[in-house]
Every structure is written in C-alpha cells, then in structure tokens.
Amino acid sequence: MKWFTLGIGVALLFACLANAQTNTLFADFIGELQSDQNAGAWRFNPMLNATAGTFKLVRLDLTSGDQTNLVNKGGEVHTFTRVAQFGGGFKAKLNGLTGNPVPAPECAQVLPDGSLAQQPESPTNQFVEAGNTEAGPTAGSSALPLGVSLWQCCIHPWMRMVVVVHEPQDGQ
C-alpha cells in the first residue's frame, strides 16, 4: 500500500498543512500567490524538499499493482486529477493568481460566457473532502497507467506531481 498525502505525505497526500488555513489570513494567502504563484501550505506532499527548505515538483515512483490512498489532512477540498498538461483549475481567480490562465481540460470546461464549470468526478478526477481518506487509483490500472502521468489539484492548480508507474521487477 502506498500512501500519498495530497498536500503532505506518501499515501498520495493532498495536504494543506494541518491548521495552515486557520493560521493564514486570506490577504496573506493571496499575497503569497501574487508573489510566487504558489501557496506553500497547500501542496501535494512530494512537493516538499525539507532538506533544502523549498518546494519543487517531485517525481513519485510506483510499481504496477501498488494501491494508493488519497489522504486530505487539510481544511479544504482537493482533487487528484490526471492531466495531459499542467494548467489551471476550475477557479478562475486562482488560475490568474498562479499564472495558469488556461484551465486543464480535465479540470474545467470553458462555457460560452467564459465562465468555468468543473469536470465531474471520475477515477482520474477524484475529489477528497477535508479530513478524509479515499482509495486512490491502483498503479498500472487505466486510471494510473504504466509510464509517466501528470497529476494536479483542479482547485489549487499549483499542487502538482509527476507519477511514474514501473513494471514489477523479478522477485517483487
């Protein structure tokens, strides 16, 4: 079983740091997005490079057959969405603040009036409520296929990761 914290950990953690939202004023959150197009407390855990004290896109390696779990330790809903290319999500204001003006089509549909509609939940677009854990895709399945795939949160489009699924080696 592989654990990623969507925002913190390896159980596919979507995680906002616990209580980070309650300790961050909205104006400070917006200011952080305006300054570096990222909100450090809202992240997929693999973005944390604790040694360097920085955030970066990190590659997560899995073996076909690994079962993932999606853990949301934060105070906000997150999505775990496979995209062909990183882009914006379905919150237009956050897209603009993070330099992602064009939404990933897997996240949002652009309506005729220019507004955005979120894509429905699916095996490759899972919504995880704050404080919840859900079964994620199995590595090597159609939702999380062999090879390289890109994943992001469609609400917080700076939350991104690269997942690589490998064939099992002999003896595994």
Image (cartoon, rainbow, N blue to C red):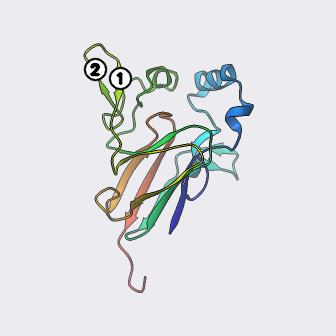
**Residue identifier under label 1:** 116
Under circle 1, the secondary element is strand
Tell me the kind of residue under disc 2: Leu
The spot of residue 151 in percent (x, y) is: 42, 46
Q: Nearer the viewer, residue 165 or 119?
A: 119
The spot of residue 17 in percent (x, y) is: 67, 43
Residue at the bottom extreme, as displayed: 171
Tell me the kind of residue under disc 1: Leu
Residue at the right extreme, as displayed: 23
Q: Quadrant of residue 29?
A: top right
Label 1 packing within 10 angstroms: few (<14), some (14-19), many (20+): some
Q: Badges 1 and 2: C-beta atoms under 8 Å apart?
A: yes
Residue at 44% in and 51% down: 162
The spot of residue 39 in percent (x, y) is: 61, 33
Q: Is residue 129 left or right of residue 122?
A: right
Label 2 packing within 10 angstroms: few (<14), some (14-19), many (20+): few
